[in-house]
Image: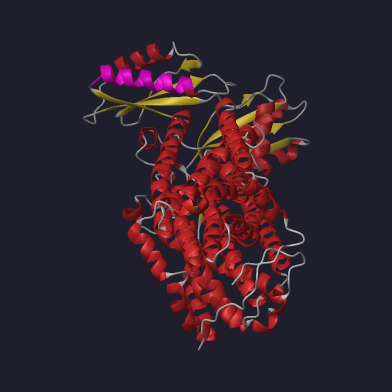
Amino acid sequence: MTTTAPLPHRRASSPTRRSPVVRVARWSATHPWRALTLWLTLVVGAMALMAVVPTQSMSDDDYGVGESGRAAEMIRDANLESAPGEVVLITAESGVLERTAADQAYESLRAGAEGIAHVDAVGPPTWSEDRSAMLVPLTLEKGVDDLDATVEALQASTAEVAEGNPGVDIAQTGGESIGTQIDERVGEDLGSGEARSLPITLLIMIVAFGALTAALIPVALAFSCVLTAMGLYAVASALIPDSGTVASVILMIGMAVGVDYSLFYLKREREERRKGASTIDAIEIAAATSGRAVVVAGVAVIVAMSGLFLTRDTVFAGLAVGAILVVAVAMVGSVTVLPALLAKLGRWVDRPRIPLLWRLNRRIGEGGISKRLIRPVLARPKTSLLVSVGLLLALSAPALGMKLHEGTIDTLPQELPAVATYHDVQRHFPAERPTIEVVARADGNATEVGRALDDLATRAQAEGLASDAEPVAVAADGRTSVLRLTAAGADGEQANEDAVSELRDTAGPAAFDDLGRVEWALGGDVAATMDSQDNQRGALPLVVGFVLLLTLVMMAVVFRSGAVALLTTGLNLLSVGAAFGVMTLVFQNTWAEGLLDFTSPGFVVDWVPLFCFVVLIGLSMDYHVFVMSRVREGMRRGLSTRLAVEYGVRETASVVTSAAAVMVSVFAVFATLSMLEMKQMGVGLSVAILVDATIVRLVLLPAALVLLDKHLGSLRRPERTREVVPAA
């Protein structure tokens, strides 16, 4: 049985050499107005940059990888890329489309579209086989960087025509329309996430502190970090453009780590003031303890996120840059501007108090509940370890059946008009399906290459690899030719991927091998999806190995213990496995559709697990470093390992619980948004943080540390540089 023992009394010492974190915090505390002015200048400057320098979005060229990327490059070099286009679907409200009404609507559409800038042509209408629908193609100009204004004008014109022809249903869709509406929805989701996460986070902080000022500081500082990171990313996007989700990631991670880091620091400063330290001394002690833990945790997140660069994928690179920027800003803010705020406010940080919450917090005390929960764990560490590991392995088991696939039209919000119309177009016109492009480049034998492509088109249609083929397009110099095939299946069907594999492995080589020196490649929508997935599979071992190895080395250096480093890695993998298992259970089945308002695609979007892995490895270090720092603090003061573990968990219980509540609530908000990727990411991250803050922190970690007692001697060694030592 364990007992709670007070720490051996130790007076605060004046360090002969302070660490950089302590020196920066002391300067900010003794020069608060300068520190606050510098921070406001940074925030305002970043927001000005965001207003002046628009965030650059990814173009189609940025998505290309593998053979499909090479095919797209060959097509661009020959100026043979397809012109962007939209389609307008005309159907009858009653189900039977009269030709007169359809022709009248078509003429109105053509008259309205021809006067819009960057509309190249309005093609002749196409009727469906059952004559129940008419499709009007709209060709836009090639080489225009921004077609948003053109698409908006076309949508307005289409809506006007629809009002003038009440007897028919008229709707517009296409890649540009879907992209525009997705961008609008992402913006709405981002605003919704902000509107929900801010008051929830503030409420949690009020409960945690029992005082309004103390609650406002972490929320305000975190939000300023988000704004700053978005402004800085606007500049960085010139080199690494935005895939459309970077802003959401910055908000989600920024609010989580920004509040957490401030919370760690602020809680320790208040604790030291309650023990009798002056405001400046309390700030300095907080910097030497919690401030150092914040820096270590922040660097761990940055190291983990940098692993995404190994994918050599622009989407992952953009997500990594956004996350790294917001974590770096939050880390800097917590050890610079936060000490300045605390120095200016002094004891007013605990005003105005919320009477009931303030008394409740004082009555419970630090770790009052966790102290009772951890005692059975410390009394029976082996049993606790086996039960908790078994539980996490059970949660992780479904991840073995996780299916990954790139996002399709089915993973987009189905209530968007352009998405709904796209499904209607596919139903009435099966030829409107993904494309497969075969491009060949040769010198001097263009006729033979063209004949080979024609034969390939015939074979592809005869064997069911394609449903239709366009005439072969030849570049002006005669060196490059392109065959465009229409996939046999709808978007996302396995048959399309099987067709690409057959064309690449068998039909393509048979068509070109006898022609001598011919460079050819197969690309298009389906091939690009497959190549992106193959690229991620190839990069996965590199990213996982890089992240785990560097975090392992970091923990070994920070705590000077190989046992702690290995334990950290094992606990991280268990948390990630549990999160992936829950993601698989939720999104590959239908039981949670009504709960989270989504339609299960039967898979997890391919980039989400890899991104969640690096984020979770980084974020799980927050609590781990914070708790382990307190455990080491107790061991250095002479406590036994069992008592030091109890002390570390007890003293960090309230702050870790509050920080976890913030993270879980922020991530859970994203699980309610309309974009499926955000839902999956929100569920995965919130589950992992919940597991990490409960099962791992209260059961696994304490039990493992007690069992590893003989291997933790290095934790008792003093620091190489003297720091401020808090008085007992």
Describe residue 483's horizontal placement relative to residue 655 as left or right: right
Q: Is residue 151 magenta?
A: yes
- Residue at (52% x, 60% y) in the render: 270
- Residue at (36% x, 20% y) in the render: 158
Please tell me whether the stretch drawn in magenta is mainly helix, strand or loop. helix
In the image, residue 482 lies at what x, y percent?
63, 30
Residue 263 seen in the figure: yes
Q: Which residues are magenta?
A: 149-166
Q: Is residue 100 magenta?
A: no
| 176 is higher (above) or lower (below) than 624 | above
Which quarter of the rendering shows the C terminus? bottom right
| 283 is higher (above) or lower (below) than 413 | below
Splitting the image into 4 quarters, where does residue 32 fall?
Answer: top right
Front residue of 675/727: it is: 727
| 297 is higher (above) or lower (below) than 449 | below
In the image, residue 156 lies at what x, y percent?
37, 20
Describe residue 534's horizontal placement relative to residue 444 as left or right: left
Describe residue 448's horizontal placement relative to residue 263 as left or right: right
- Residue at (70% x, 58% y) in the render: 546
- Residue at (62% x, 75% y) in the render: 634
In the image, residue 97 lies at what x, y percent?
26, 25
In the image, residue 454 lies at what x, y percent?
61, 32
Residue placed furthest toward the bottom: 1
Residue 591 seen in the figure: no
| 137 is higher (above) or lower (below) than 672 | above
How many numbered discs sit on the rendered protein? Answer: 0
